[in-house]
Image: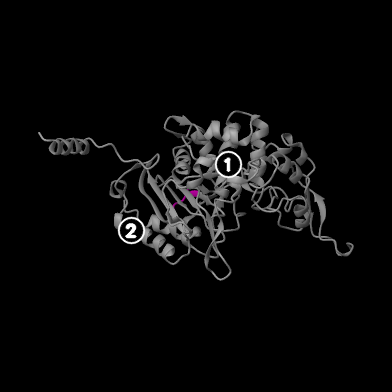
Amino acid sequence: MNTSLRSLAVLMLGILFVIPATGQGFALISPEDAGFSTPRLARLDSVIQTNIDQRRLAGAVALIARDGQAVHLKSYGMQDLENGTPMPTDAIFRIASMSKAITTTAVMMLYEEGHFLLSDPVAKFIPEFKDAVVAVAPPEDAPAGTTFVTEPARQPITIHHLLTHTAGLTYGGGLATARYQEADLIGWYFADKQEPIGEAIKRLAGLPLHGQPGEGWQYGFSSDVLGYFVEVVSGMPLDQFFEERIFKPLKMHDTSFFLPPEKADRLAPVYGHNQAGELELREPTATTDYLHGPRQCFSGGAGLLSTITDYGRFLQMLLNGGQLDGARLLSPKTVELMRVNHTEDMYPWEPKGFGLGFWVIDDLGRYGELGSVGAYGWGSAYYPIYWIDPQERLIALFMTQLLPARGLNLNRLFYTMTYQAIVD
């Protein structure tokens, strides 16, 4: 047999015994083998590409997996418009508030070890929260210029309040905003702070709350408090706890608070829309704090970097009831508790409920869009979104870097375009 024929024979033998293709941790299968329609998934591709062609975003990556196998893993557009770099599927993204689900998982791992009850006051572990007060409107006879007065919190802030965003903590917005500004605690961005997260949280504990604990849903610093809480309970810095207890067991090799220099070329720059609606570069890799900043403050609320398949493995662990590839982080009963509505009708942003770190759909008719009862998920200031659907045995993620998005609804359309592609 000549060399060419021998090579062809070897190739054909390989095809007969093919190992499923992998997409950085997920086996890639035919959509039809998992109950999806390839032509219908092409509609999703078309919607994403149209938005890129119209310069509403630079590029993106999408992952849809059912039963732990990827039916859709694609990149679109450019990672870097200035250099013409195509978006790779292993691009690294700032995931901002998608960090919250990982912090929740860390808290629940420690909960399972018997360190606390969810009803315990956080002041038991962070004493600075002991005598919390709440900012309220001043009385009519208050001195001129008085913007608020305080009243005692009617109940202590509990771990459960922090997990459900009912602790009275905003990102500094409210009657006492000036006090938060003086304390350098406005907004979710911590990557530029030259201090450990614990110092920021102790300072936060001395500021007035913007709501009574347990009496309303407010989005804010709760998950950052929980990140420091993990440090206190575990005796480990948050980055170390995440790496040893979550990232290594789940083989999330590209997830971290700050980026190693050798991975700089994979970090997607941040683009955003200016006032005229034009797409422009907002945070290039050459100046980002995630590479060049102080690298000191580990934000459990909004600090992590990750890839779509790394984060996909984390979601698959939750979908599997707390385990993945032999690594068990949580029990199925704990995951069950995390993904039910804990806040009744307090959650104000959509007709959904809120669990321990993410929205949940508990009434599909009230929600009013394609989805499933029991699905849960969240998103990011940089525009990525994720969700987990136990009923459909599905995880889905959309990753990009867009801030501000100025009303773009592509991330919401991603839900619809995913569900309409399910045919079995």
Q: x%, y% of residue 58?
A: 46, 59
Report the amino acid beneath label 1.
Answer: Phe
**Residue at screen point 48% across, 37% down:** 253
Report the amino acid beneath label 2.
Answer: Ala
**Residue at screen point 83% across, 60% down:** 138
The overriding secondary structure of the stretch rendered in magenta is loop
Residue 162 versus residue 197: which sits nearer the camera? 197
Instruction: Tell whether 377 sits left or right of 294.
Output: left
Residue 365 in view here: no
- Give yes or no for residue 32 being in the magenta stretch: no
Magenta-colored span: 372-376
- Give yes or no for residue 374 being in the magenta stretch: yes
Query: What SS does tag 1 mark?
Result: loop
Q: Is residue 81 above or below residue 243?
A: below
Residue 388 versus residue 64: which sits nearer the camera? 64
Instruction: Tell whether 338 sits left or right of 45.
Output: right
Q: x%, y% of residue 246?
A: 53, 34
In this figure, which residue is indicated by the disc labeled 1? 257
Circle nearer the N terminus (1, 2)? 2
Query: What SS does tag 2 mark?
Result: helix
Instruction: Tell whether 145 sits left or right of 86.
Output: right
For discs 1 and 2, the disc positioned in front in the rendered view: 1
Q: Residues within 10 Å of mark 1 (few under 14, many from 20)?
A: many
In this figure, which residue is indicated by the disc labeled 2? 42
